[in-house]
Structures are given as structure tokens and as C-alpha cells.
Image: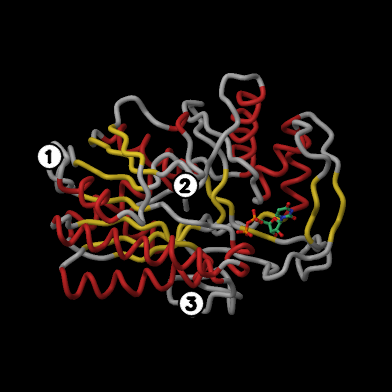
Amino acid sequence: MLKQDMNILVIGGAGYIGSHVVKALLAHGDSVTVYDNLSTGCRENLFPQCRFIEADIRDYSALQAAMQDAERPVDAVVHLAALKAAGESMLEPERYAEHNIAGTIKILNAMTAAEVPFLVFSSSAAVYGEPQYLPIDEHHPTEPTNFYGATKLEIERLLKWYSQLRGLRYASLRYFNAAGYDPDGEILGIERNPANLLPVIMEVALGRRPHLQIFGDDYDTPDGTGVRDYVHVTDLAGAHILALDHIAAKQQNLVLNLGTEHGVSVREVFELAERITGREIPMAVAARRAGDPAKLMASSQAAREVLGWVPRYSDPETLLQTAWQAYLRSDSGIASVSGSDSS
Ligand code: UDP
């Protein structure tokens, strides 16, 4: 480790993954400023110890101010601010290009202007597209099948150039299916209008939506439903700390998958959710969702070898248990239902 107490700007730090990363950085002893436009992130996710800047990544002067007017120089940026709905990205590519690609260029330019040396970037398994083999390792071809994945891949290409031309050191972390909530129950914001499987199931269990639609049960998988590699958000957050320490200490760039190498089917998630919530979850099989591959699983051997990363909370029971606790809290009024993700 290079430095114990780094000063870190977390862009998208009020979102679902961002807030878990902030919690991990604070526990690691770092100083954190959260930069977020609160479009999907939420105030309940802000930790009182953090400075907060409410601003958009398309606002270059706000980025410059965040990187240059801080009480002390920013040592590193963690960038998790993005639009992330794959289906929507196919219908509104301009908005995705503007937020994800143009917004990130502004972040990179503000970083080079302020000489901020380190970046941890939220990338995605969506950079790979249709799997050509499983589990997917980092050498797998990158041919995104949706524009969201294409924006993440474009940014990865830019990172290489900024590294070569400006000496930026970065870690690009390709998340598989982020799920679960803070096991300590400290992170209170719940996603608004979720489209991902676990939050949808939670909303059905609470009666906030009528039923779960299983998108296809005729895939070439053991029970016919889609198989994914779910990874706990607290495990993802831990990988950010390890990655930052690594790039700072070794002055090396990293591109790493974060997944567990274990596939779980939609039907298995549904059945486990009924058991853990103790509630009946109305379900109907619907048509396949466009662009959904049958199976996605990561090889995370590189993250284990390079970072010593070991997922601790990513078993299906803990994923669902921690998610259910968070939704029960939100339902009992301890937290208000609000925004979420920025990955
Ligand atoms: N899924 C489903 N119903 C839903 C949401 C998702 O059957 O309401 C399925 C989806 O087809 C996929 C898996 O659950 O097989 C995970 O989907 P999610 O949107 O959570 O993540 P993705 O893998 O698309 O990033």
C-alpha cells in the first residue's frame, strides 16, 4: 500500500454501488468527497463524514473545482457515475453517449489538469457481449451487444491512451451481476424503478408490484431460465480498495473481472427468495428479453491472483438475505424509497 489516508473523490458515490464503495473507503481510513447529481443516487446514501458536491459529470467547471479546490489535493478518483440500463441504451444512444462517454472524457481531462494520478473505473461484463466460452476471462473478445456495454468499452480504450500519454494509472473493474446490500444495514437508499432481478423480486415480495416476470424458461440451461454470476456489492466495494492500493503501489494498470464463477438461475433465485422472505412471490413466465444471453459467468482468477480478492458475501443466501433486510427497512419507514445505482 502506498498511502494509508488517501483523499478520494467518488463520482457517483450516492448510488447503489458507489455508497458501498464509500463505506469501504471510510473503513480503510481514507478521506472521501462524494460527487453525484442525485439523478439516481440518493441523499440517504451519503455518509456524514464525507464532503458532498451535488453536480453533474457533464459540468466541467464543477469537476475542475472538485479536483482543484479541495482542502487538499485529490489523490484518486473512483468513477461510478453512468446510465446503466442496457435496454434503454439501445433506444437512447445519444443520452448514453453524452453521459457515459462525454462525461467520462470531462472527468479524465479534469484529472489530467489537476494531476490526479489514479482512477478506479466501474466497467461491466457488458463489454464482452455474447459469451464465446465460459467462464469469461479478461482475454475473451469484447463485442458488446448493447450500447451501454459499448460506452464502457470506449472508455476503457480512452483509459489506455490517457495512461500512455498522461501517465494515468487506472483499474477498470468489470462487474458481473451486482446484488445484495450492506450486511451492517447502514446503507439505506433503495433503488427507484429497478429492472434487475433481485430488486424486482424484493418489490414483488413487498407487494409493490404485482408479479415477477421470468424472461424466458426455454434457454439451454439446466432449468431453462437464465444463469448469471451474482456478486455481492460489499465484495465489489472491497475490490475497489484492493485495486486502488495495487495501482498506487505498483504503478500498474488493471482490467479485471469481478464475479464469483458460480452461476445461479432465475428460477433458483426466485425459489430461494420465497424461502428467505417467507412470502409468496407471484410469478409468470414471459418472453425472453432482447439481448439476454442464456448464461454469463466470470472467471475472477485474475482478481484473486493479482489482488488477493476473495468474495465473502456472494453466496445466494447472503445476497438475498441482505437485500431482503434492506427492503424490509425501507418498507418499515426507516428509510424512504429513493434512488440508486450508478454503475
Ligand atoms: N430477469 C427476469 N425478470 C426480471 C429481471 C431479470 O427474469 O424482471 C432475468 C434476466 O432475463 C436475466 C437475469 O434475470 O436472466 C438477470 O437479469 P438482470 O437484469 O438482473 O441483470 P443482467 O444479467 O441483464 O445484467
Q: Residue at x 39, y 42 (%)?
A: 13
Quarter of the image holding residue 218?
bottom right
Count of numbered badges drawn on the protein: 3
Q: Is residue 1 depicted above or below 26 in this figure?
A: below
Kindly report which numbered mark, 1 or 3, lies closer to the viewer in this rendering: 1
Q: Residues within 10 Å of mark 1 (few under 14, many from 20)?
A: few
In front: 226, or 56?
56
Closer to the chain start, of discs 1 and 2, is: 1
Q: CA distance from mark 3 to mark 2?
A: 22 Å
Identify which amino acid the numbered label 3 is placed on.
His
Q: Are marks 1 and 2 in contact (CB under 8 Å)?
A: no
Residue under numbered circle 2 = 311
Q: CA distance from mark 1 to mark 2?
A: 33 Å
- Ligand 1 quadrant in view: bottom right
Residue 31 pos. (x, y %): 23, 35
Q: Would you say 223 lies left or right of 304 here? A: right
Identify which amino acid the numbered label 2 is placed on.
Pro
Identify which amino acid the numbered label 1 is placed on.
Arg
Closer to the chain start, of discs 1 and 3, is: 1
Q: Are marks 3 and 2 in contact (CB under 8 Å)?
A: no
Residue under numbered circle 3 = 140
Q: Would you say 89 lies left or right of 310 here? A: right
